[in-house]
Image (tube, grey):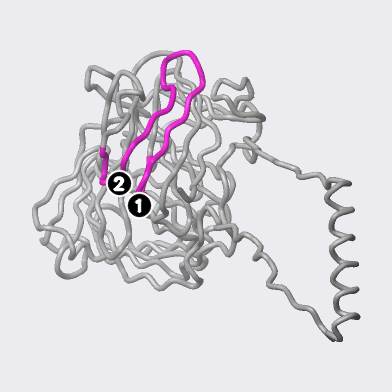
Amino acid sequence: MRTNRITARRSPVRTTMVWVCILSVLTLALICGVSCVTTTPTPEPTVTPMWTPTPTPVVLDCIGFEDLALGTRYHVPDRFMDSEVEMTVRAFQWGNGEWSTDGFTEVDDEGRAGGSGQEMWINNVNLDFDFCCVLEKGLTLRFGEYGGNLNIEINGIFKEFENFVDIDGANFDGVTVTVTNGLGNDTGTLTLKGQIWSFALGGQELWIDDVCPMGCMVKPQVIGCVDFEDPPLGAQYPILGSFQDSGALIRVAAFQWGSGDWTTGGYTEVSNEGLAGGSGQEMWINNVNLDFKLLGCPFRNLVIYFGEYGGNVNIDINGEFRNSANLLDFDSQIIGSVEVRVIDGHENRPAKMELIGEVRSFAIGGQELAIDDVCPWVE
């Protein structure tokens, strides 16, 4: 956590001068018969919040995948939007516990989810939904499931299972699950009731349609810096895990090595070694990406304090993904229509990165990378 505090002390000389001025004005008023002397006060400076949330509640339409071009395929870690909701393609866990990043999702119109118009075919990937808010009442969706296993993640709780009926009646951190049909090789509906702050769903031969969020509510507070003081020291989070800090949701995602291969074997851990140059707790990133979801997005400008100590790095801004040897390589580049500035970004010491522009989505990862104080800010 980084704090910069400037305290102004009163000067005894200045206080004496103020009283002299007051007595002079009163004397002048008595001599001249002036009943009231007025002056124009100096206005107090206004402080602009680093990030202002969208008013509540927010009405979101059902996601029908009609905004997307028919036949378009998306792979890990692609992002796309439909009905003003961003979705990110994530790694998928097979029934044997191994992870895959080789799948895809494709815009289809075969009606296999039981809806109408376009739908989404999910093939060995997870779709991570970013509603930019908390769903106070839950969501519903249509599905068609025709083989293989399934993944679901709700509020940081991940489960791998065979058929939707297997999770009927389950509870994920206060969110109850109701399934119609879901025996395999059929269509049905999935209903989640309760407060949802993260949601991802995946399968091997899965079609979904009409994903309808209910009660989209943006938290009524200004979000400051994400300084990792909320999660417990030493906590580790694996692939597709998620946690909250300072009102933001952070998702753990697969990492791409310098060779172009993807790994799902890394983790992130809450540390306090000061490697990012801040104070208190920080986040140690080991062969994963951290995807930041700040409620009420998009927001303007972002600053990140980091320390880089080996290996390559990943960054994703507004759906444009980059892989390089060092974060300094991104200095002065435009990524996702956002200007990147890196200050003192050499290896083995703390540094700072600034993103200038409208940021809808942001992820950062490395092999031996520490980060702290991820802060929306006003330039």
- The residue at 54%/32% (across/down) is 372
Going from N to C along the chain, the mark reached first, 1 or 2, is: 2
- The residue at 39%/33% (across/down) is 364
Q: For residue 29, what is the image quadrant?
A: bottom right
- Residue 116, percent from left and from top: 17, 70
Taking the image as shown, residue 13 lies to the left or right of residue 266, namely right
Q: For residue 147, what is the image quadrant?
A: top left
- The residue at 45%/48% (across/down) is 379
- The residue at 35%/23% (across/down) is 328
Taking the image as shown, residue 41 lies to the left or right of residue 89, namely right
- Write down the residue under mark 2: 318
- The one nearer the camera, 159 or 254, is 254
Q: Crowding at label 1, few (<14), some or many (≥20) Cα neighbours within 10 Å?
A: some
Q: Crowding at label 2, few (<14), some or many (≥20) Cα neighbours within 10 Å?
A: some
Q: Which mark is residue 358?
A: 1
Magenta part of the chain: 334-362
Magenta-highlighted stretch: main secondary structure?
Answer: strand
Cα separation, mark 1 vs mark 2, equals 9 Å
- Residue type at mark 1 is Glu
